[in-house]
């Protein structure tokens, strides 16, 4: 490979895997021989009290920062705020970015964590539709066990965007005494009826593809057409209205057989991404999200957040048309204010919609740094 | 049939059909032997100057008001504002509700207007994918010809919701001197990149269904599974976040094999509707919407609306997540204000999202009545 320009960050990383002999799930089943992929940036100090857990979004992986090689075109997805001297300062903190159980990725080096595409130890074949129903609480349990193996007890913070924020909320609910801060970007406290329906439509698109074969497809012949349609919908719901209009507008497509440039891009981009994702894992992850309900039968969000970690930083995106702030952020903000929490809110800008929680995270760099570095008052 | 209670309105109607020997289209093709369905409410006066044209939404038909029989469960979709003594008072006005060319419906008595499901005069078989590309301007041309046949020249108003508003805007653009008022609910002046993508996803869902057969399906074996998924997406985008949450929330489904009550309802409802719609016509109508661009190469919306009818009433829905008011309504309101138009704006309530333009139209009854009855100042 020819020499390439020095990347913006010097942070180099690699994918590691922790194995867990078993993992009991919220549904009652137990997974055996579980793998969890992770990456670390910075070093754990002697007291073991400088660790931050970073959790990823729906179609992401634990590649949150840095590059695997200096020639890599793009760094991890929160590289703008994770690194030496950055808001999540790896000169100070030991950052562990960890895969969510059920991670949908199958491209190297990402596809390492146990999911519906993993071999079922009982049969040697992929779980597929037999993969047990998982929930955000299961992601937290797997992460708690991996952190134990890494010698990390207490966390300075749990942080992440979208499903990463869901995991942070689930940490606050399950292990409030292990966590000092929650940094949650574009995250819902539950999935509401409209999004349950939209996620179901994504599943439907995959199931319409004859190659899906009720989930028993050959991994070499996956249902790429259906998965491409599902990904298009997720990209459109998460993407920014303004950014899409600025990029493609109402321009006609260049080629034959397609009418709009917007369609041509969407087709190309979604098909590329479909090659990095397993369809059964994607459905399993849709369902895990549909099950997300922080309140879970309790009387109020106030009752839930009363026992939360000392400080919470919320980063909603003002023009989020997937996790609409009025429906998803406002009730949590109210509940936290009602309990007198040390709450900070930094609204992310409009152009990229929901994806502001990824592409515009630098906008919140100062808020994140201050959240991590200013002394806690309780 | 046993006697049933007297319906809320006494208005009885029937479906009529006007045939046009030919219709030249914006794309350059010419349709021959075109049928256009319509209904009328009230009577044309002797001077022929009391007519109002009402245009319908994407999956609607010209059944805007009244019942075909007193036993009908539901009246037409704008019955709340069309009828004797109502906001669009059929004691005063001659209301013509007319199908849009390409109407997607195939259920009786709706499926009468020429669309992709109609027999191609050249072959005797359904046009299917050979149906020429249509646009809102073509709907207007067909309506202008039908009104000529009915003896209607000038219109007191063109009114409608969603695609009905698009047709009203297209009338204002094509025949401004024939129209005194525009009453446009939840209507866009163009389709933007995000919605072009979402409409493409609906088309993709139909094409994924093996029964689609590249559009050459047997009308007796239509691609109902794909069409059901497409309809689900349209229902979710147009539906109200609040209303969906109030109706279904996060309740589990009753039956086996389905997780959420929301999914069960969505499946049932969309499959019912799929039986009333032709898949090729639906794709043709998606494309007609994607082509909608009122500005169409002109410098500004101001330049377009400068020559518009005397009065415009806009009825955006405050929580519309399909035709988002900030993106779709605000620029038109600004343009009309800039030209000093006699502009009225009545915002429709939140609960039903985009569909407020149908289900909550009674909220705008006074605004519609005043728009129609107060004297024009220019």
Image (cartoon, coloured by chain):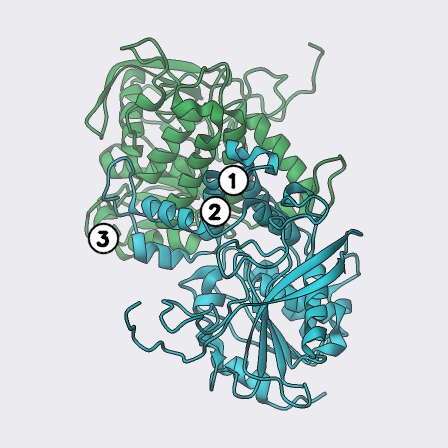
Chain colours: A green, B cyan
- Chain of the residue on which disc 1 is drawn: A
Work out which quarter of the rendered image holds the N terminus of chain B and state it.
Answer: bottom left
- Chain of the residue on which disc 2 is drawn: B
Label 2, label 1: how far apart the Cα atoms are = 9 Å
Quick one: label 2, few (<14), some, or many (20+) residues within 10 Å? many
Q: What element carries label 3?
A: loop
Residue identifier under label 3: A300
Residue identifier under label 1: A233
Same chain, labels 1 and 3: yes
Front of the two marks 2 and 1: 2
Cβ–Cβ under 8 Å for marks 2 and 1:
yes
- Chain of the residue on which disc 3 is drawn: A
Q: Can residue B288 be seen in this view?
A: yes
Q: Position of residue B166 (x, y in %)?
A: 63, 63
- Using the image as rendered, state which of residue A369 and residue A333 is in the foreground: A333
Same chain, labels 2 and 1: no
Work out which quarter of the rendered image holds the C terminus of chain B and state it.
Answer: bottom right
- Using the image as rendered, state which of residue B40 and residue B154 is in the foreground: B40
Q: What residue is shown at x 35% (from left), y 70% (from top)?
A: B71
Residue identifier under label 2: B233
Quick one: label 1, few (<14), some, or many (20+) residues within 10 Å? many
Q: Is mark 1 on a helix, strand or loop?
A: helix
Label 3, label 2: how far apart the Cα atoms are = 31 Å
Q: Position of residue B32 (x, y in %)?
A: 74, 55
B264 in relation to B189, above or below = above
Is A15 situated left or right of A142 in this image? Answer: right
Is B191 situated left or right of B186 in this image? Answer: right
């Amino acid at each position: 490979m020819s020499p390439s320009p020095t990347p913006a960050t010097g942070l180099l990383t690699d994918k590691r895997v922790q194995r867990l002999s078993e993992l009991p799930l919220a549904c009652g089943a137990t997974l055996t021989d579980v793998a969890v992929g992770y990456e670390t940036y910075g070093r754990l100090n002697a007291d073991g009290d400088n660790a931050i857990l970073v959790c990823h979004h729906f179609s992401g992986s634990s590649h949150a920062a840095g590059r695997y090689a200096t020639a890599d075109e793009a760094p991890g997805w929160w590289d703008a705020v994770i690194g030496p001297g950055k808001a999540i300062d790896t000169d100070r903190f030991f950052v562990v970015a960890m895969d969510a159980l059920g991670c949908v990725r199958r491209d190297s080096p990402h596809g390492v964590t146990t999911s519906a595409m993993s071999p079922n130890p009982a049969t040697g074949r992929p779980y597929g539709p037999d993969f047990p129903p998982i929930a955000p609480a299961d992601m937290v349990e797997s992460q708690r066990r991996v952190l134990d193996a890494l010698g990390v007890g207490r966390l300075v913070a749990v942080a992440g965007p979208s499903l990463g924020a869901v995991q942070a909320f689930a940490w606050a609910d399950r292990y409030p005494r292990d966590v000092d801060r929650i940094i949650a970007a574009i995250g819902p406290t539950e999935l509401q009826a409209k999004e349950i329906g939209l996620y179901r439509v994504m599943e439907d698109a995959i199931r319409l593809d004859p190659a899906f074969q009720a989930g028993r497809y050959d991994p070499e012949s996956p249902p790429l057409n259906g998965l491409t349609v599902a990904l298009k919908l997720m990209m459109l719901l998460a993407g920014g209205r303004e950014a899409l209009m600025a990029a493609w507008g109402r321009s006609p497509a260049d080629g034959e057989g397609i009418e709009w440039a917007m369609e041509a891009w969407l087709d190309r981009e979604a098909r590329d991404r479909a090659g990095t994702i397993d369809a059964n894992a994607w459905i399993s992850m849709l369902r895990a999200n549909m099950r997300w309900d922080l309140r879970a039968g309790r009387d109020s969000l106030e009752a839930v957040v009363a026992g939360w970690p000392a400080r919470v930083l919320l980063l909603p995106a003002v023009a989020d048309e997937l996790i609409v702030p009025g429906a998803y952020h406002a009730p949590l903000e109210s509940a936290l204010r009602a309990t007198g929490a040390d709450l900070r809110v930094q609204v992310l800008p409009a152009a990229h919609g929901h994806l502001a929680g990824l592409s515009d995270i630098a906008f919140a760099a100062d808020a994140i740094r201050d959240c991590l570095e200013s002394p806690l008052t309780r």
